Image (cartoon, rainbow, N blue to C red):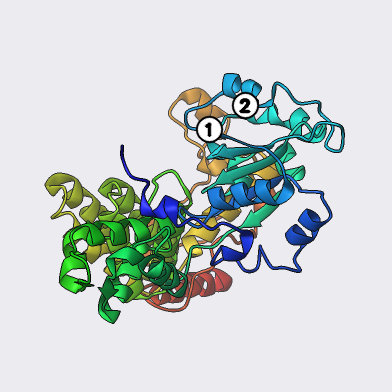
Amino acid sequence: MQPTPLAARMRPRSLDEVVGQSTVLAPDGPLRRALAAGRPPSLLLWGPPGCGKTTIARLLAEASGLTLRSISAVTSGMKELKEATAAQSGALFGAQAPPLLFVDEIHRWNKAQQDALLPLVEEGAVVLVGATTENPAFEVISALRSRTWLLRLEALSPDDLAGLVRRALTDTERGLGGQHLQITDEALVLLCDLGGGDARRTLGVLERAAATCARGDTIDLALLSRVSGGRDLQHDKGGDAHYDVISAFIKSMRGSDPDATVYYLARLLEAGEDPSFVARRIVIAAAEDVGLAEPRALEVAVAASRAAEQVGMPEARIPLAEAALFVALAPKSNSAYLAINAAIALVKQTGAAPVPPHLRSAPTAIDRALGHGQGYRYPHDHPDGFLVQNYLPEPLLGAQLYEPRRHGAEKVMDERQRWWLSRAERS
């Protein structure tokens, strides 16, 4: 028979033993007061892996005296939901108390499946505790969110994890105390770093290290490095971690921080992100945030995108880094971005304003008879290739959509535009 994993054995036996969630589980907090009053609320527990969502659900059921029924949204559907709630009376304070229904990974259920929970929660047939690693605002229907308390759980800090490790090493009943193991300070720091805020992962690595030790041994850096398997970057391509890191990458380029830029680029690539996706973000940043202040940025970004596609990983990291750093260190201007957005807004507001007759195409005799193209003056026939004539539709004359910045390469464009305007005023 397979022994129970260390992480399972070391699970807290009361809410007071839960570490890292002192705000949510404060003795005088709303949740504890509701439990003390015998009115356990339905909850959504939102937090990263290994922060205690499942454990808290179990302890809430015990503290409330309710039967715990657990289902996973990954492997369960409507059939399992009906089985878990079939025998309930539907009255929270009736003769038969409702169960505490724990739905792990609740964001995996579709809208129809989540809708099925609504009457159960509304009628008191269950006390729902849903657990999710993803933002409930995006993944849980609004009707269900409005009927539950949302509790945000945090990843465990290195100090929290260090406390768990020390407890596991000294606990002779549930932990590894019988082996009388020691751990060096350096190894403890590395172990908590490798855990990445996840208690299960931290204790799992500790258990693997302990399995290679004799009684009384010391766990050091060398041993820990052999059994750790490296860091888990927790980068779900469809989840919050993905969007958080890519957001930080984009904002670091926009904010002209080369060190942060290349750091988040490394995070994305090491987590297995598609290089073509990363390349597209760099191209967008070059156009949107650098723009006309350094037009070469777009050329560099596009070239890097093509190069990354041609060579593939791991070599693709080099042109992507070059392009990302070029964008980060380039002068910034979003004038083109603002100009096209302003133009689109104007088009939506005014509709299809008539093109001035002198600018219209006149390929046929009928077009010419209608006056299309008449009065158009060819700029190259005039000094400096410039003359004054109206180009915007008549109702929109005077509209200013592009406002250049006065730095980087765009400074020259600003001076050029001012020169054209001064020529126009003298005409």
Question: Pointer 1: what residue?
Answer: 73
| Corner quadrant of residue 121 | top right
Inspect this view and state whether residue 295 appears.
no
Residue 349 at x, y percent in the picture: 70, 45
Location of residue 273 with respect to 354 vertically, above or below: below
Left or right for 213, reference 363: left
Question: Pointer 2: what residue?
Answer: 113
Residue 104 tag number? none
Q: Describe the element under mark 1 as helix, strand or loop.
A: loop
For the point 37% across and 54% down, the residue is: 6
| Corner quadrant of residue 215 | bottom left
For the point 23% across and 61% down, the residue is: 209
The type of residue carrying mark 1 is Ala
Residue 295 at x, y percent in the picture: 33, 64
Residue 363 at x, y percent in the picture: 43, 29
Residues 252 and 203: in front is 203
* Quadrant location, the N terminus: top left
Residue 20 at x, y percent in the picture: 54, 67
For the point 70% across and 21% down, the residue is: 86
* Quadrant location, the C terminus: bottom right
Residues 383 and 279: in front is 279
The type of residue carrying mark 2 is Gln
Residues 238 and 57: in front is 57
Q: Are marks 2 and 1 in contact (CB under 8 Å)?
A: yes
Mark 2–mark 1 distance (CA, rounded to whole Å): 9 Å
Determine crowd level at label 2: few under 14, some 14-19, many 20+ residues with C-alpha closer than 10 A: some
Q: How many marks?
A: 2
Q: Earlier in the sequence, mark 2 or mark 1?
A: 1
Q: Residue furthest top?
A: 79
Q: Describe the element under mark 2 as helix, strand or loop.
A: helix
Determine crowd level at label 1: few under 14, some 14-19, many 20+ residues with C-alpha closer than 10 A: many
Q: Residue furthest right?
A: 94
